[in-house]
Amino acid sequence: MTDRRRSEDYKQVSGYVPVELAREFKSFCAREGLSQSDALEEMLREWLAQKASNSSKSEQANRPIAIADVVRANMTKLKRCGLKNLQVLAKGEVLPTPGDFAIIASTLGIPEEEQKMIWQRTFSSLSNDVSGVKDERECSESPKPTRLEL
């Protein structure tokens, strides 16, 4: 067994925990025949893996959801790609052509699956925004208001 205290491959980690937790930990290690160092190493690895997993989930949740978000978040990079309508794209006032979106995705190195999701989110949110607007035919078929209704 390696003498961890003298090894350059190991470093001491310490902290303060409640007395009862320390006793329970030491007792458990003794019952199981584990060294406290081995148990701590295992717990730290599991804890770090969990935190890294939560962090990547958080990053995914913060990913841009529409083309305007992508453009807004990457204006500096996209200014070099030659698109002239970046300001209005970033505001969501206009949508890019498929060709413009291909340039954006290529410039930013967006994977194809993510491109599809961004495209779908953009256009599904657009259709949701328009769903409350009446069709022209609906408006023309409604009776004209009288002076009393104005």
Image (cartoon, rainbow, N blue to C red):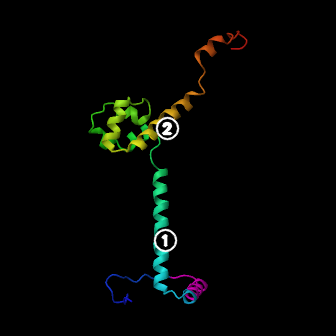
Mark 1 lies on a secondary structure that is helix
Neighbor class of circle 2 (other Cα within 10 Å; few <14, some 14-19, many 20+) is some
Task: Say left or right for 8 vs 25.
Answer: left
Q: Name which residue lies at 49% across and 81% down.
A: 39
Sequence order check, earlier mark of 1 and 2: 1
* Residue on which disc 1 sits: 46
Indicate the amino acid at tag 2.
Arg
* Residue on which disc 2 sits: 121
- Of residues 33 and 131, which is closer to you in this image? 33
Q: Tell me where residue 104 appears, x and y as whole percent.
A: 34, 38
Q: Tell me where residue 26 appears, x and y as whole percent.
A: 55, 88
The stretch drawn in magenta includes residue 25:
yes
Determine the CA span between mark 1 and mark 2. Answer: 35 Å
Q: Name which residue lies at 39% across and 33% down.
A: 89
Name which quarter of the figure residue 21 lies in: bottom right
Task: Say left or right for 21 vs 11.
Answer: right
